[in-house]
Image (cartoon, grey):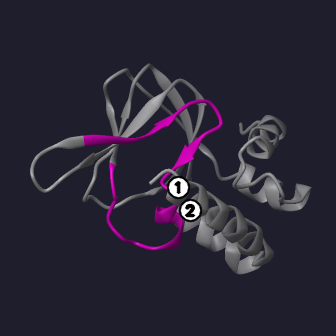
Amino acid sequence: MVDTKSHIQLLRQVPLFAKLNEKHLDKLAKRLVKRAYENGQVIITQGKGGEGLFIIYDGTAEAIRNQPNGEKIVVNEFGEMDYFGELALLDEGLRTASVVATSDISCFILTSWDFKGILRDEPEIAISMLEELANRFRRALETL
Protein backbone atom coordinates (compact mmCIF):
# COMPACT_ATOMS: atom_id res chain seq x y z
CA MET A 1 0.00 0.00 0.00
CA VAL A 2 1.28 3.47 -0.89
CA ASP A 3 2.05 5.77 2.03
CA THR A 4 0.70 8.88 0.31
CA LYS A 5 1.22 11.23 3.27
CA SER A 6 4.94 10.48 3.55
CA HIS A 7 5.31 10.71 -0.24
CA ILE A 8 3.63 14.13 -0.19
CA GLN A 9 6.06 15.26 2.53
CA LEU A 10 8.96 14.04 0.40
CA LEU A 11 7.69 15.87 -2.70
CA ARG A 12 7.36 19.10 -0.71
CA GLN A 13 11.12 18.96 -0.06
CA VAL A 14 11.97 18.65 -3.76
CA PRO A 15 12.31 22.09 -5.40
CA LEU A 16 10.61 20.89 -8.58
CA PHE A 17 7.39 20.19 -6.66
CA ALA A 18 7.66 22.53 -3.66
CA LYS A 19 5.13 25.09 -4.93
CA LEU A 20 2.41 22.60 -5.83
CA ASN A 21 -0.80 22.46 -3.81
CA GLU A 22 -1.95 19.47 -1.76
CA LYS A 23 -4.24 18.09 -4.48
CA HIS A 24 -1.45 18.09 -7.06
CA LEU A 25 1.07 16.60 -4.65
CA ASP A 26 -1.41 13.85 -3.78
CA LYS A 27 -1.83 12.89 -7.45
CA LEU A 28 1.92 12.74 -7.98
CA ALA A 29 2.59 10.93 -4.68
CA LYS A 30 0.26 8.10 -5.65
CA ARG A 31 2.34 7.46 -8.78
CA LEU A 32 5.80 7.24 -7.18
CA VAL A 33 7.59 3.92 -7.49
CA LYS A 34 10.36 2.98 -5.03
CA ARG A 35 13.68 1.60 -6.30
CA ALA A 36 17.03 0.79 -4.68
CA TYR A 37 20.48 0.65 -6.27
CA GLU A 38 23.83 -0.52 -4.92
CA ASN A 39 27.00 1.55 -4.73
CA GLY A 40 28.54 1.67 -8.21
CA GLN A 41 25.40 0.60 -10.01
CA VAL A 42 24.41 2.54 -13.12
CA ILE A 43 20.97 4.09 -12.63
CA ILE A 44 20.59 5.67 -16.07
CA THR A 45 22.83 5.46 -19.12
CA GLN A 46 23.83 8.30 -21.42
CA GLY A 47 22.42 7.84 -24.92
CA LYS A 48 19.63 5.48 -23.85
CA GLY A 49 15.93 6.25 -23.47
CA GLY A 50 14.60 7.30 -20.10
CA GLU A 51 11.65 6.16 -18.07
CA GLY A 52 11.20 9.32 -16.04
CA LEU A 53 12.30 11.39 -13.08
CA PHE A 54 14.31 10.05 -10.12
CA ILE A 55 14.12 11.58 -6.63
CA ILE A 56 16.79 10.49 -4.16
CA TYR A 57 15.55 10.04 -0.61
CA ASP A 58 18.60 8.21 0.73
CA GLY A 59 22.13 7.99 -0.65
CA THR A 60 24.24 9.74 -3.26
CA ALA A 61 24.94 9.57 -6.99
CA GLU A 62 26.83 11.44 -9.67
CA ALA A 63 26.06 12.35 -13.26
CA ILE A 64 28.84 11.45 -15.67
CA ARG A 65 29.01 12.66 -19.25
CA ASN A 66 31.06 10.66 -21.74
CA GLN A 67 32.87 12.97 -24.15
CA PRO A 68 33.48 12.06 -27.82
CA ASN A 69 37.22 11.69 -27.05
CA GLY A 70 36.45 9.01 -24.44
CA GLU A 71 36.97 11.29 -21.43
CA LYS A 72 34.41 11.02 -18.63
CA ILE A 73 33.42 14.19 -16.81
CA VAL A 74 31.42 14.38 -13.57
CA VAL A 75 28.84 17.06 -14.33
CA ASN A 76 26.76 16.89 -11.16
CA GLU A 77 26.55 15.25 -7.74
CA PHE A 78 23.27 14.33 -6.09
CA GLY A 79 22.17 13.73 -2.50
CA GLU A 80 18.95 13.46 -0.56
CA MET A 81 15.98 15.30 -2.11
CA ASP A 82 17.91 15.96 -5.32
CA TYR A 83 16.36 14.85 -8.56
CA PHE A 84 17.52 13.94 -12.03
CA GLY A 85 15.96 12.75 -15.26
CA GLU A 86 13.48 15.61 -15.46
CA LEU A 87 13.92 15.93 -19.24
CA ALA A 88 12.50 12.42 -19.63
CA LEU A 89 9.23 13.72 -18.20
CA LEU A 90 8.93 16.18 -21.06
CA ASP A 91 10.13 14.34 -24.15
CA GLU A 92 11.29 10.99 -25.40
CA GLY A 93 14.87 12.10 -26.08
CA LEU A 94 17.93 10.14 -25.07
CA ARG A 95 19.64 10.60 -21.70
CA THR A 96 22.26 13.37 -21.76
CA ALA A 97 24.46 11.76 -19.08
CA SER A 98 24.81 8.57 -17.08
CA VAL A 99 23.99 8.57 -13.38
CA VAL A 100 25.89 6.17 -11.12
CA ALA A 101 25.20 5.44 -7.45
CA THR A 102 28.13 6.56 -5.26
CA SER A 103 26.61 4.83 -2.23
CA ASP A 104 23.72 2.46 -1.73
CA ILE A 105 20.80 4.59 -2.81
CA SER A 106 17.01 4.62 -2.61
CA CYS A 107 14.95 6.59 -5.09
CA PHE A 108 11.39 7.27 -6.05
CA ILE A 109 10.62 7.29 -9.75
CA LEU A 110 7.85 9.18 -11.49
CA THR A 111 7.44 7.75 -14.98
CA SER A 112 6.81 10.02 -17.92
CA TRP A 113 3.71 7.97 -18.75
CA ASP A 114 2.17 8.66 -15.32
CA PHE A 115 3.32 12.28 -15.29
CA LYS A 116 1.79 13.07 -18.69
CA GLY A 117 -1.45 11.42 -17.62
CA ILE A 118 -1.62 13.66 -14.57
CA LEU A 119 -0.83 16.76 -16.64
CA ARG A 120 -3.78 16.05 -18.93
CA ASP A 121 -6.06 16.47 -15.91
CA GLU A 122 -4.01 19.09 -14.03
CA PRO A 123 -2.17 21.36 -16.51
CA GLU A 124 -1.41 23.93 -13.75
CA ILE A 125 1.26 21.55 -12.48
CA ALA A 126 3.27 22.23 -15.62
CA ILE A 127 3.45 25.99 -14.99
CA SER A 128 4.96 25.59 -11.54
CA MET A 129 7.39 22.93 -12.67
CA LEU A 130 8.49 24.88 -15.75
CA GLU A 131 9.37 27.84 -13.52
CA GLU A 132 11.61 25.64 -11.38
CA LEU A 133 13.17 23.99 -14.44
CA ALA A 134 14.00 27.45 -15.83
CA ASN A 135 15.61 28.38 -12.50
CA ARG A 136 17.62 25.15 -12.49
CA PHE A 137 18.80 25.83 -16.04
CA ARG A 138 19.91 29.36 -15.09
CA ARG A 139 21.82 28.01 -12.07
CA ALA A 140 23.53 25.45 -14.30
CA LEU A 141 24.60 28.14 -16.74
CA GLU A 142 26.10 30.19 -13.91
CA THR A 143 28.54 27.36 -13.17
CA LEU A 144 29.96 27.33 -16.71
Amino acid type assigned to the residue bearing label 2 in the image: Phe
What's the distance in space between the residues labelled 1 and 2, CA to CA? 5 Å
Pointer 2 residue: 137
Which residue shows up at 53% across the image and 65% down it?
89
Task: Point out the image quarter for the N terminus.
Answer: top right
Q: Residue 98 placed where, x, y %? A: 32, 46
- Rendering quarter of residue 75: top left
- Rendering quarter of residue 129: bottom right
Pointer 1 with pointer 2, Cβ within 8 A = yes
Asked if 33 appears above or below 17 in the picture, the reply is above
Which residue shows up at 59% across the image and 55% down it?
139
- In front: 132, or 121? 132
Taking the image as shown, residue 4 lies to the left or right of residue 31, namely: right
The disc at residue 140 is 1
Amino acid type assigned to the residue bearing label 1 in the image: Ala
- In front: 74, or 31? 74
Magenta residues span: 73-97
Taking the image as shown, residue 6 lies to the left or right of residue 89, namely: right
Magenta stretch encompasses residue 87? yes
